[in-house]
Image (spheres, coloured by chain):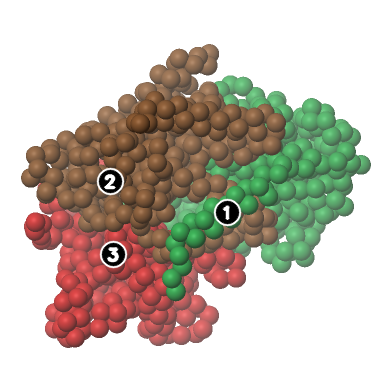
Chain colours: A brown, B green, C red
Amino acid sequence: MQKSKWGSFIIIAAVTLVVYAVVRTLETMGLIDQYWQRVLDQALIMTIGALGLSIIYGFTGQFSLGHAAFYGLGAYSAGLFSKVYNSDHNLLLFMVSLLVGAAVAGLVALVIGLPILRLRSDYLGIATLGFGIIVKVGMDNFNKLIPALGGATGMSGTPQLANFDWLFIVALLVIILVRNFVYSTYGRACTAVREDEIAADVLGINTTNTKVIAFVLGCALAGLAGGMYAHRYPFLHPSSFDFLKSFDFLLVVVLGGLGSITGTVVTAVAWVFLLEVLRFVLGQTFIDFRGVIYALILIIAIIVRPQGIFSGREIGFLVPKPFSTLVGRKDGVNAGTGS
Amino acid sequence: MRINSKWFVVLMVALLSLALVVSGCGGKKADDKTIKIGVMAPMTGDVKTFGESTVNGVKLAIEQAGGMAGDYKIEYVVADDRNDATEAVNAATKLISQDMVDAIVGSVTSKASIPVSKMANDSKIVMISPTGTNEKITVEDGKRKDFIFRACYIDPVQGNVAAKFALEKLNKKTAAILYDQSNDYTIGLGNSFKETFEKGGGKVTDLLAYSSTDADFNAIITNIAQKNPDIIYLPDYYQKVGLIGKQAREKGIKSVFLGGDGWDSPELDYTTMEGSYFTNHYSAEDPDPRKQDFVKLYKEKYKSVPDFCAVEAYDATNILINAIKNANSKDHEAIRKAMQETKDFKAVTDDINFDKNGNPTKSITILQIKDGKQSYMTTVTP
Amino acid sequence: MEYFLDQIINGLQLGLMYALIALGYTMVYGVVKLINFAHGDVFMVGAFVGYFGFTQWGLSVPLAVLTAMAVCSILGVIIEKIAYRPLRYAPKISVLISALGVSLFLEYFCSLKFVFGPNYRVVTRPFQEMHWNIMGVTITNIQVIVFFTVLIMLLLLQFLLYRTKVGTAMRTVSVDHDAARLMGVNVDNTISLTFAIGSAFAAAGGVLYAIAYPQIHPFMGIMPGLKAFTAAVLGGIGIIPGAVLGAIIMGQVETLTSAFLSSQLRDAIAFLILILVLLIRPTGILGRNEPDKV
């Protein structure tokens, strides 16, 4: 008897609700205090942003080192919008601001992407890195044009409307969106481009369009993550959006396993928590060692599992029925072979 | 050695969960006879040394107070903000919700202090920043954050004093300003200097920017050399200043250098900066007994000369302890009231009175670098 | 006019500084096809060792440089063995992440108190700075030293790669490891040697940098490393003269932008130009467009 596709949907929905309910209860009970709430929220923001880079690099093989720039563009746009237009904390305007953030990031990605996506891997990395630096310089100096942006002094005043509920829902929607994208024709085209661009071209896939779509979508997600960030952290400063932050996103995507949504999500959450847990474990005396241990864990993790933790694998329910045989349960020689 | 990678994953997940459980098990609220002070400072990151000085100052103050604030025993917790705005918020959340501190001393830079100030104010926790000089820390969008104070002067004041000094005492007419475009501290000082200097009839020949990570300043130095300004204002931290100064001198620039409290460090390149002036919170050479006593205490304990972070942190902590003593209560509103009403508290750097914005009116010391060390010149009360 | 020439010299100095680092970067990439993010940090270690050499251990400058080069060679070989070799046949991005990890590790480890400490140290120059006035522009002895060092490094590398057996082995390894093995090349040793030489060059660069811009601290390698890497790509990554060319161009663009356009937008414009150049010459200025074989 065919398992009804609604059946699995209901199961997934139920599980999600349970997870949400559990977290919420723990929060209200005080078992998860404000601090860990914030860490959790930060993890969710990271997840959204990392999923964006996952589409760009994990699934389409485009080496982008400028992800933080789009994250920042989204943060500032959404933050500025809310700061100026949404002083009454209207939830509808909040949603609009998020869209603004994503749209700005996406539009800039379109403008930038069209010319530079023709570059090959390492060169694309440099170009995006360079773009990231250009944006950072812009952030430092833009207050000359729009004083409210704050420049190097930073921008505050964005109403802090993003709480766990919002983040959870948005993260969930993003996961669903990404999953649907990956297994759609566009997504398959992306994977084809990643694996062998020439072969994809020969097969009639418009590689330029594919790359641009993936880039724009991925950067828009970064912008969305940025928008959420602006509404959860009261103060935006350009130094939070430099190339080191881009490396953070890259790290999460690679460690999680290229081409795996599960990997990106799990690693994003784990990585944020790891950093905070280190703070506790090390205590005051050894706080110095936080960076050293973080770096060591990174090196060891990538040596032990070079293909990433979840490479080639996905949690069952993320994979639509027709693909379940294609996406392996074993380590795939999946992504990351792109030059 | 083949580690089965799957087990590695399992191990990491297990470790992570364990760590989460251990650390997630909530914080302890201090008992009724203890008061908890949170210290926010950059213990790691690019201004790590400032963080260490700050914590040193705080520890010394607590020690000198016998570990007591009035009838309350003092317990302190240090949180690292890495001089990053996001980290600062995380660290502050930890202090406020997990460690449940009753007051915060911190942070060092405005970048970290501004976001934390909002949080502290919202949670009704008194916060005093030892060295955060940006106005936005205590006043934002025209509104005072009642629970927030600072121990130092604010950027505009320092810049003004420097400009006036240049115009009136040094009789200089032209000045070039070099600033770090990603460091709001230098921008603030640079702007206020420019304003006062020009208002006083001086001419700012150039206002040029560099980046925090730069080491080669030849381009901008050659640029400003063209107009041969009397003064070059370098309102940055001591590390940059030494580097810029050296390169400027090597290019043959004869202008007098002028700077701010960021110059204050035993590690400043005194040889290069010979003859320069800078504004500061205090001078370790100041014969004033309050300062000398402090320097002696600090040197004994830490074997080094205290910099501006150390002295301001010491003062900030003492101001707080004094307020707690006066309030004689752990109630946050009582502490806040006592803080605001601090009257002529004899801190090392000055007598402290808070204005309505939570800023103390502090005198500014002007020092000259002479014979390879700081030489006290004069004190200006703005 | 004189101002313009002065700035050109400034740009040249800056560019040559980048070249010191870029040469090592590009050489390693050429052989191992790895963007060694840790290169800038090996540079930092070299600077520190050299600093200790002529400040605390009383070594003469050339001896201090050699010591730094020796120490960093060993460091480079160790790094390769531990962090890169296990990933040699893994996806390229993995070893890149490992390089990132090594870079972070070096920075944080060296800023621990019992190692170098986080403080910025002022470097007292081990020799007197002299300058001469030639045709209206000022040239310093340090600029001359750097110029000749870059020249020597460039010539040495070219000679090594194209006139020696070792160099041929390196070039073979850069094409195909298995074919190299079949030709009797010890791939492991060749790669180790590559890192040893690359790191030694980084160290030499570090010591010179510390003398020219007399300040060192554990995070000093990040930006120069990044800019040098950009320069190497600009000139065509993997191509030795390309690194020098790219570096000089970057130095000039940065300096002239700051001098004539805007000091604030300097980096933005410099990288904008970089992107434009890449759009016109996608594999760098001297880069060869290697067609993808299907």
The answer for how far apart the CA atoms under marks 1 and 3 are is: 33 Å
Q: Position of residue C107 (x, y in %)?
A: 47, 63
Of badges 1 and 2, the one in the foreground is 2
Q: Position of residue A309 (x, y in %)?
A: 42, 54
Q: Give the amino acid type for the residue marked by disc 3 in the picture.
A: Leu
- Of helix, strand and loop, which one carries label 1? helix
- Of helix, strand and loop, which one carries label 3? loop
The residue that mark 2 highlights is: A326
Q: Name the residue rendered at 73%, 42% in the picture.
A: B27
Rendered view: A91 above or below A270: above
Let me know if marks 2 and 3 both belong to one chain.
no
Q: Name the residue rendered at 21%, 50% in the picture.
A: A195
- Of helix, strand and loop, which one carries label 2? loop
Q: Nearer the viewer, residue C264 or B115?
A: B115
Q: CB under 8 Å between callouts 1 and 2?
A: no
Of badges 1 and 3, the one in the foreground is 1
Which disc, if any, is residue C213?
none
Rendered view: B118 above or below A84: below
Left or right of residue C137, residue C50 in this image: right
The answer for how far apart the CA atoms under marks 2 and 3 are is: 32 Å
**Viewport quadrant of the C terminus of chain C:** bottom left
Q: Chain of mark 2?
A: A
Q: Chain of mark 3?
A: C
Q: Name the residue rendered at 54%, 58% in the picture.
A: B11
The residue that mark 3 highlights is: C34
Q: Nearer the viewer, residue C178 or A216?
A: C178
Q: Position of residue A243 (x, y in %)?
A: 38, 48
Asked if one can make out residue C72 in the rendered structure from this viewpoint, the answer is: no
Asked if one can make out residue B24 in the rendered structure from this viewpoint, the answer is: yes
Q: Give the amino acid type for the residue marked by disc 1 in the picture.
A: Ala
Q: Nearer the viewer, residue C76 or B197?
A: C76
The residue that mark 1 highlights is: B14
